[in-house]
Amino acid sequence: MIEVNDIHKSFGDTHILKGISTVLEKGKTNLIIGQSGSGKTVFIKCLLGLFTPDKGTISLDGKIYSQLSAREQRNLRQDMGMVFQGSALFDSMTVEGNVMFPLEMFTNQSRSEMQDRANIVLERVNLVDAHKKYPSEISGGMQKRVAIARAIVMNPKYLFCDEPNSGLDPRTAIIIDNLIQEITKEFDITTVINTHDMNSVMEIGEKIVFLKHGIKEWEGTKDEIFKTDNEAVTNFVYSSELFKKVRQMYIEERN
Amino acid sequence: MNYLASIGSYAIMIKEVFRKPTKWRIMKSLILKEIDELIYGSLGILIFISFFIGGVVAIQTALNITSELIPKNLVGFATRQSIILEFAPTFCSIIMAGKVGSYITSSIGTMRVTEQIDALEVMGVNALNYLVFPKIIALLLYPFIIAISMYVGIFGGWVAGVFGGFSTSADFIEGVQLDFIPFHVTYAFLKTLVFAFVLATIPSYHGFYMKGGALEVGKAATTSFVWTSVVIIILNYILTQLLLG
């Protein structure tokens, strides 16, 4: 569980995060949504420890990140997995090399043990046949799956995903969403997903935090998002005709 | 003020490079890869350039000897002095700033743009140590290719001088051996080691701290070449004053 308490972050005179507090729950897919420039990326980078908040605290299972020593922070980072928007796979390594990389860096396992572990997670993301290929030789969806495999290979407690569906076709996007949700349940981890994709919100949004201009405007579940009267949320989520109709059908069904 | 800030962040980067080392098992393979890329990969171009520059130095020296009073062995002497003191250590380093420097900046810059450096940092890896330290260690072998450059440059001078009819082999070799001061080679290697550090770190700095996309990677590579060359030229002056002045 990640508890965020009144965090602020500025760059120069630009105040990006203006006092965000929320609880991101364990075993659930927590979605951070909002328009471009709403502070989502800065928020997730604060959670990852890549940015230090100017004010406020972030507590990961009771450990307040800013109060930990540099060594403790590094150790805590080994409990975090991250799936980047562009996958961020290492070009010079094969799929297997990418997945084994955290094991090589942080464990003393033998090469065969690392390969076994890499094969287990690659099998989990349905990518066993691609383990000798380089990132440039596989599709965008496969790259995302390799990134997920790399993120979970160390059995993390926290999984962060920045726009995991960007650049993917709708079918592959749903496969990636479902995979992330399954992994969240299977490993009982705290998953935080930064997204614009309303399909993801409807598909896997167990907890949704809506940011607007650096402020938490609304939070709730995917069921609650259908019922909310918050104008900023409805303008953002139901901006397309398709989602307006989906919402209408949902309301009619409930009535 | 921007220059001062850049010098400050460069100094902080150097400190970070030597903190929290990567496991030796991984570092060893990274160093070998960089030796292959930066040292072995540069050998061909440096041999090619050294041979022809040595030849040009010999021809130009010979063509400028108009007085009968000047000994014929000056061609070999001037070629040796030019190659050992300046061409091999300094001119080759400027060439390396273009070849190796732009490679380092663009490869690290691309890793920055594609979030690969963020991925390393999120994992808790010291990205500067992982990326820059192997380059510094690999470039410790730089004096070896400069030694080859010296040999090939003087050989190029001999070929051009003798086969171009500008000098006899005996005169050229006598000139090469004339008044040889071993400290000049030490001076050249000391300069080379300093330049090697500059070649590894300034392009890395420009790649690591770049912002933007693919276009900015290209701009960073150009800026890195300019600054690496400027720093090499300034350090060349300072080191020459300190060691020979």
Image (cartoon, coloured by chain):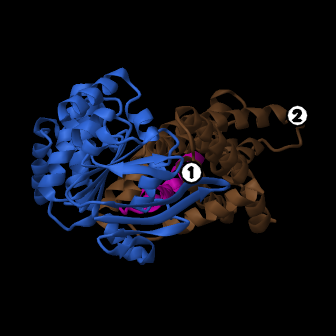
Chain colours: A blue, B brown
Any part of residue B35 in sight: no
Q: Nearer the viewer, residue A82 or A130?
A: A82
Q: Is residue A96 left or right of residue A35?
A: left
Determine the main secondary structure of the stretch shown in magenta: helix
Name the spot of residue A205 as percent of width and height, x first: 26, 44
Q: Which residue, given by chain and number where applicable, does mark 2 sit on? A: B66
Check the image and name the residue furthest to the front: A255
Q: Is residue B132 magenta?
A: yes
Q: Which amino acid, mark 2?
A: Thr
What is the distance, in whole Å, between disc 2 and disc 1 at their CAs?
54 Å
Q: Is residue B35 magenta?
A: no
Q: In the visual, does A85 lie left or right of B137?
A: left
Q: Residue at x 56, y 62 (%)?
A: B13
Highlighted magenta segment, given as a residue range: B124-151
The residue lying furthest to the top in this view is A241
Give the chain of mark 2: B
Quarter placement of the N terminus of chain A: bottom left
Say which residue label 1 marks.
B209
In front: label 2 or label 1 = 1
The residue depicted at 62 percent of the width and 65 percent of the height is: B11
Q: Quadrant of residue B235?
A: bottom right
Quarter in which the C terminus of chain A is drawn: top left
Residue B87 in percent (x, y) is at 68, 46
